[in-house]
Image (tube, rainbow, N blue to C red):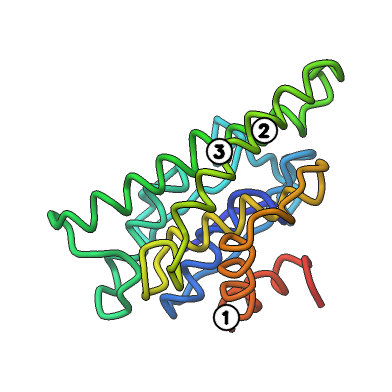
Amino acid sequence: MKLYYSAGACSLTPHIALKEAGLAFEAISAPTKTHQLPDGSDYYLVNPLGYVPLLVLDDGSQLRETAAIIQYIADLVPEKDLAPANGSFARYKLQEWLHFIGTELHKGFAPLFNPATPAELKPAIIARLQERLAFTDSELAGKTYVMGDTFTVADGYLFNITNWSRLVGVDLSGYANLLAIRARIAARPAVIEAMKAEGLIR
């Protein structure tokens, strides 16, 4: 398998999932600013959409979109419990979290990275994000990880997206439950490996 990623982008989520799964893969840098691959070629020739992540299987099949990719990875190694079993209510709760993180948090942060976003709109964008983060924090009360006592692919996604807070001035200091789970995730060997591989930590 090949994972196309851009350092620190949402592609860190499947990078973490692959490390947690213990699967063999090749990580290929596809920076979102230049779209130039290590061999000098244009990433758009691989993925016409130009964004990451992109997972390319050994037979050439491609998977886009973070939530789809990480569930696929989890299902390759069911013994790792990275996702509840397909068809179970718990699996739908996982999907609920993945959709929430993707649409309310991931997309909530996106305008703050866009230089075209008018400065006068940013306080309202941040305020809405804070509402969603406060809800997230309340949902995490009493939990070890997002889904309860077991690490799942939702944890990697939540960790990845909330990492962006320090880059755009979104304060997480009031969210004790979120911060505790973030610290727990950050300490996992697979997460450390993925972040080191992307040059995010030493």
Q: On screen, 126 above or below 150?
A: above
Give the residue drawn at x 44%, y 43%: 64
Residue bearing the label numbered 3: 132
* Quadrant of image for the N terminus: bottom left
The 10 Å Cα crowd at callout 2, few under 14, some 14 to 19, many 20 or more, is few
The 10 Å Cα crowd at callout 1, few under 14, some 14 to 19, many 20 or more, is few
Mark 2: amino acid:
Ala
The residue positioned farthest toward the bottom in the image shown: 189
Q: Quadrant of residue 199?
A: bottom right
Q: On screen, 11 above or below 147?
A: above
Give the residue drawn at x 52%, y 55%: 157
Q: Nearer the viewer, residue 176 or 59?
A: 176
Q: State if disc 3 and disc 2 touch (CB < 8 Å).
A: no
Q: How many marks?
A: 3
Residue bearing the label numbered 2: 110
Mark 3: amino acid:
Arg
The residue positioned farthest toward the left in the image shown: 87
Q: Nearer the viewer, residue 130 or 7?
A: 130
Give the residue drawn at x 30%, y 64%: 83
In the rendered structure, which disc, 2 or 3, sits on the residue that comes first in sequence? 2
x and y percent of residue 26 in the render?
55, 68
Q: Secondary structure at mark 1?
A: loop
Residue 192 seen in the figure: yes
Q: Secondary structure at mark 3?
A: helix
In the rendered structure, which disc, 3 or 1, sits on the residue that comes first in sequence? 3
x and y percent of residue 139 in the render?
44, 53
What's the mark number on residue 188? 1
Give the residue drawn at x 65%, y 77%: 192
What's the mark number on residue 157? none
Mark 1: amino acid:
Arg
x and y percent of residue 141 in the render?
47, 61
- Please identify, in this view, whether the residue under mark 2 or under mark 3 is nearer the observer: 3
